[in-house]
Image: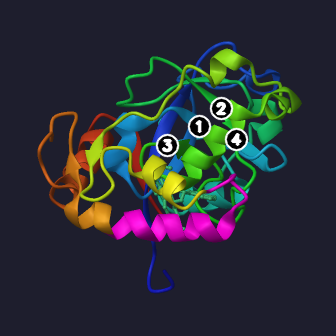
Amino acid sequence: EGVGPQEYTLIKMKLLQPYPAKLSKVGDKGVYLVAATLRPETMYGQTNCWVRPDMKYIAFPTKEGEVFVCTTRAAKNMSYQGFTEADGKFEVVAELTGQDMLGCALKAPMTSYERIYALPMLTIKEDKGTGVVTSVPSDSPDDYAALVDLKKKQAFREKYNISDEMVLPYEPVPILEIPEFGNLAAVAVYEKLKIQSQNDREKLLEAKEMVYLKGFYDGVMIVGEFKGKKIQDIKKALQKKLTDAKEAVIYYE
Ligand code: A2H
């Protein structure tokens, strides 16, 4: 970080009906929560989408006539990257909070779960990515911690009106094999470091560092068309597969 722009893959998570009230009048060509990820090769393992309840989001039309939902900051960046009709301009067709989207059903690319839900994550940063995060609890310690928080704390689900069926049936999916960490690396480090919740910031940072590089250099795909191949060799190809299928776009900041 710090040197030059960071490239993200924006995963288009398609909003399914019924839409939240504030989005009911937009997007004949589809409304997408767009999630910024550094790990396109993990999309086989998506179990849900994260939004921050108290954060502000907007919906804006792209030049293809689709509607993207993200922070204003990200929309502005996208408008300078050719996403909108006019360079540097975007039309706000709805303003909403993360709270407004909680419990929405989504269709995400590659995952075996037919529909997944928008759930609360309280540690999402305003000044990074799109404010929407896709959740891969098999390989992201942050995602696993936030999912466990929801699974084991009924009061937390109730506070945000999240029903049991949006959370309880969703389990981490083995998608990568990483030497030392097995096929659910995030679960392994979460347990090893005895992480208690998504607010355990120091341990989560340590957990991330433990699995990240090791995964990149020595991790092997165990599902999908690149099964048996090393992550570092197929990361770009998987990103291209997603963008060619119009299920993702490239975004810089
Ligand atoms: B990653 P970096 Cl499997 N706030 O995607 C907090 N976290 C955010 C965010 C925001 N506003 N925007 C994106 N992110 C997450 C997958 C993944 C990610 C895996 C493993 C590790 C990992 C599935 N979630 O990230 O600061 C997104 O989660 C470890 C860092 O730009 C995104 O990639 O490096 C990553 O953080 C971007 O963080």
The 10 Å Cα crowd at callout 3, few under 14, some 14 to 19, many 20 or more, is many
The CA distance from mark 1 to mark 4 is 15 Å
211 lies left or right of 214? right
Quadrant of the image occupied by residue 93:
top right
The 10 Å Cα crowd at callout 4, few under 14, some 14 to 19, many 20 or more, is some
Residue under circle 3?
137
Residue under circle 1?
49
Tell me, yes or no, whether the highlighted magenta stretch contains residue 201: yes
Residue under circle 2?
118
Would you say the residues marked 2 and 1 are in contact, meaning their CB atoms lie under 8 Å apart? yes
Q: State the SS at label 3.
A: loop
Nearer mark to the viewer, of 1 and 3 = 3
Q: Position of residue 160 (x, y in %)?
A: 83, 31
Residue under circle 4?
149
**Residue bounds of the magenta highlight:** 195-213
Mark 1 or 3 closer to N-term? Answer: 1
Q: Position of residue 82 (x, y in %)?
A: 47, 56
Three-letter amino acid code at the position of disc 1: Cys
Between residue 70 and residue 186, name the one nearer to us. 186
Three-letter amino acid code at the position of disc 3: Pro
